[in-house]
Image (spheres, rainbow, N blue to C red):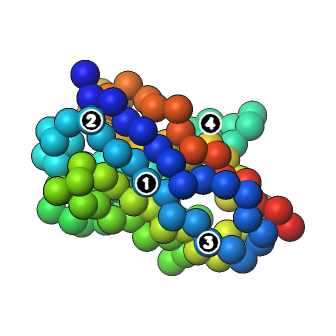
């Protein structure tokens, strides 16, 4: 089973930036679309961004050009660059591979992003 390890979160002020990383334990991840998701307290998990194995990206409307997803297949890693962060971006950010039936891998621990006003 592929393990996912997220890192890079932290506490930043409004308008700040962070770079999140998601490392997969197996190179099989390179064949799948990967996505970043977030869940704020009391809210459902929502998609932030996805990237296909061919590098095609998709973003949630609330991203509005502030975030950028990328991947490095040689390192089995997916990145999420967060710019112009706002307090409403505060959430636990996790990565996974979406599938028609849900998600392909077990969820990792995620990485907490907290934005202060």
Q: Distance between the residues labelled 2 and 4?
A: 27 Å
Residue 59 percent coordinates (x, y): 43, 63
Question: Which residue is identified by label 4?
Answer: 44
Q: Residue at x 43, y 54 (%)?
A: 21
Q: How far apart are marks 3 and 1 (CA)?
A: 14 Å
Question: Which residue is identified by label 3?
Answer: 17
Q: Distance between the residues labelled 3 and 4?
A: 24 Å
* Mark 1 / mark 4, whichever is N-terminal: 1
* Mark 3 / mark 2, whichever is N-terminal: 3
Q: Residue at x 51, y 64 (%)?
A: 19
Q: Which residue is drawn at 24% across and 49% down?
A: 76
Left or right: residue 94 versus residue 2 is right
Question: Which residue is identified by label 1?
Answer: 21
Q: Residues within 10 Å of mark 4 (few under 14, many from 20)?
A: few
Left or right: residue 13 versus residue 98 is right
* Eye-nearest disc, 3 or 4: 3
* Eye-nearest disc, 3 or 2: 2
Residue 3 percent coordinates (x, y): 33, 30
* Mark 3 / mark 4, whichever is N-terminal: 3
Classify mark 3: helix, strand or loop.
loop
Decide: is 104 above or below 34: above
**Quarter of the image containing the C terminus?**
bottom right
Using the image as rendered, state which of residue 82 and residue 103 is in the foreground. 82
Res 98 quadrant in image: top left
Q: How far apart are marks 3 and 2 (CA)?
A: 27 Å
Using the image as rendered, state which of residue 46 and residue 54 is in the foreground. 54
Kindly check if marks 2 and 1 are in contact, taking CB atoms under 8 A apart as contact.
no
Classify mark 2: helix, strand or loop.
loop
């Amino acid at each position: 089973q592929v393990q996912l390890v997220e890192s890079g979160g932290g506490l930043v002020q409004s308008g700040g930036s962070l770079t999140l990383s998601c490392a997969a334990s197996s190179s099989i991840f390179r064949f799948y679309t990967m996505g970043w998701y977030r869940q704020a307290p009391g809210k459902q998990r929502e998609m932030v961004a996805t990237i296909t194995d061919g590098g095609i990206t998709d973003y949630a409307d609330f991203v509005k050009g502030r975030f950028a997803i990328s991947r490095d297949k040689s390192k089995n890693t997916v990145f999420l660059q967060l710019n112009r962060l706002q307090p409403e971006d505060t959430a636990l950010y996790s990565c996974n591979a979406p599938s028609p039936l849900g998600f392909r891998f077990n969820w990792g621990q995620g990485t907490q992003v907290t934005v202060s006003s």
